[in-house]
Image (tube, helix red, strand yellow):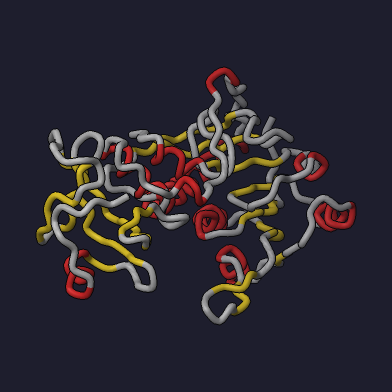
Amino acid sequence: MINKINRIIFMGTPEFAVPSLQALLDSNENVVAVVTQPDRPKGRGRKLTPPPVKVLAEAHNIPVLQPKKIKTDEFLDTIREYEPDLIIVTAYGRILPGPLLHLPPLGTINVHGSLLPKYRGAAPIQRAILNGDRETGITIMQMDEGMDTGDILLPGSLAIEPDDTSVTLAEKMSALGGKLLKEALALLRKDQLPPIKQDDALATEAPLLCKHEAKIDWTEPAEKISCLIRGLEPWPLAFTTHEDKWLRLFRPQVIQGAPDEAPGTLCRIDKDGLVIAAGRDYLLVSEVQCEGSKRMPVDAFLRGRPLEVGIRFT
């Protein structure tokens, strides 16, 4: 049996979803509509700003739907009028109801940012870095009513580099997502994309990030602190405190060694940055941001706010 895919509805919102939609456009897929989140106020001026997916869709004259609510009969009827053969979702940002998932003949597939069943949930990219993983990936999956519990269709792996942040890793993963999506549709048309049940015993969760996770505990190993800093960029951003003010840290590197100093002690200042003792090894940070200022290299920061070797961050 050859699967018929003539009409596609795409659902996505942030920059991460753009390569998936672009892959469909590059393959001349018939995207009959795009569903994305409503425009949101951004920046200091709180100017109403469209989601990146909307910008791309409108540039290609694709109808854009921005419902405030999707669990309504009215929205379901609107989608039904487009007669989609398949719905494709990449980081839309809301849980989809069962009637919507099962409306198209081929159902709904998702471009998920982890190698399922690992990291089901809203923050799989960040959690992979926070946990010190060396590999992650993308899973094209068949969606069901559960939280990322549907059948696996096509996985693809990707290395996590030591200097990757959630920002840089998301860029690479979104590109991989677009590539895998094209491959999955080609296989689906040939009926060569058999679903594979997830092993629930191997499942882990990737819950939303919280601000309380961002405070650095210097008694932890430097490697774990590095993962925290990189995983929480761009939000909520890891921080330490000095003289009752917060200091955010960026671009960490682990320096091996057995510190004699107490955890959190500033041991050295040089052209590369601040070297701080951790519970195990040392942490070098090359960029910082303090309250009331912008992110900057350490040498620029020190010209206005000198620090002394021997102080202790808390």
Q: Position of residue 125 (x, y in %)?
A: 46, 43
The residue at the point 87 percent across, 54 percent down is: 77
Look at the image and tell me whether residue 185 can be seen.
Answer: no
Q: Position of residue 201 (x, y in %)?
A: 57, 18
If the image is split into quadrants, where does the N terminus sit? Answer: top right
Vertical comparison of 145 with 104: above or below = above
Tell which of 129 and 101 is nearer to you.
129
**Residue 310 horizontal side relative to residue 87, left or right:** left
Tell which of 117 and 103 is nearer to you.
117
**Residue 264 horizontal side relative to residue 174, left or right:** left
The residue at the point 73 percent across, 39 percent down is: 107
User: Which corner quadrant of the image does residue 277 belong to?
Assistant: top left
Hey, which residue is sitting farthest bottom in the picture? 45
Vertical comparison of 240 with 43: above or below = above
Look at the image and tell me whether residue 8 can be seen.
Answer: yes
User: Which corner quadrant of the image does residue 302 belong to?
Assistant: bottom left
Q: Position of residue 78 (x, y in %)?
A: 84, 58
**Residue 132 horizontal side relative to residue 178, left or right:** left
Q: Position of residue 221 (x, y in %)?
A: 28, 35
**Residue 241 horizontal side relative to residue 142, left or right:** left
Tell which of 62 and 69 is nearer to you.
69
The residue at the point 24 percent across, 41 percent down is: 263
Number of numbered discs overlaid on the protein picture: 0
The residue at the point 60 percent across, 35 percent down is: 141
